[in-house]
Image (tube, rainbow, N blue to C red):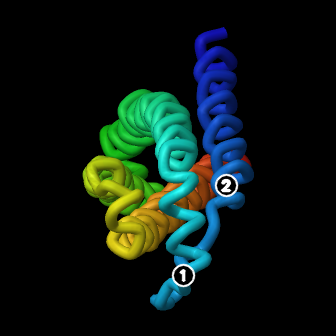
Amino acid sequence: MRRSRAGAKLGVAVFGVMIFGVIGGAVSAPVSAVELNADQKGAISTNCETIKQSIQQLTRADSKTRVYLGGAYENALTNFIVPLNLRLTKNNKPNPGLTSVQSKFAEKRQAFNTTYTKYMKQVEDLLAIDCKAEPESFYEQLQTTRASRATLQQTTLELNSLLHDHIDGVKKLRSGL
């Protein structure tokens, strides 16, 4: 009974990660450096408050997603991946593939935390710019922030892939018993 609950929890964690991967795919790629024309500068200045409100809403949603994913990643690592590898090692049946996934997953999880912190700092810097007075600086920081968000999304996709690799490794291990 305990195994089925643990499997269900891992399934929920993987499902949540996959959902974010689908939603995260909507992140726009960073735009190459472009000089803004007068109309673009005017549009940024005129819509400054609306733009900032949208960014704040996105930030709140990102924050909730980060808490959820951070917890799911931590849960997968500490309650499933590490205990299984420890059990295999204690039984003198270490699995190099699963150990490799554990190592990569722990590294990517740390990268996720670091990248998210960097992204949030860039959002703060973006919101601190007076887009009415400095539309070019605002747009430049917006591009930097978009690039960080795209990097964060890529990290979540890599973590998702590692979770799938772990599940595949467990299935192979099970079939070999």
Q: Residue at x 60, y 32 (%)?
A: 13
* In-front residue for pair 156/98: 156
User: Mark 1 highlights which residue?
Assistant: 38
Q: Residue at x 50, y 90 (%)?
A: 34
The quadrant holding residue 152 is bottom left
Disc 1 crowd rating (10 Å Cα; few below 14, some 14-19, many 20+) is few
**x, y percent for residue 130:** 32, 55
Q: Secondary structure at mark 2?
A: helix
Does residue 119 appear to the left or right of 51 in the view shown?
Answer: left
In the rendered structure, are the residues bearing label 1 and label 2 in contact, judged by CB atoms less than 8 Å apart?
no
Looking at the figure, which quarter contains the N terminus?
A: top right
Q: Which mark is residue 83?
A: none
**x, y percent for residue 30:** 53, 76
Question: Three-letter amino acid code at disc 1?
Answer: Ala
* In-front residue for pair 16/25: 25
- Residue 80 visible somewhere in the drawing: no
Please tell me whether mark 1 or mark 2 is closer to you in this view: 1
Looking at the figure, which quarter contains the C terminus?
A: top right
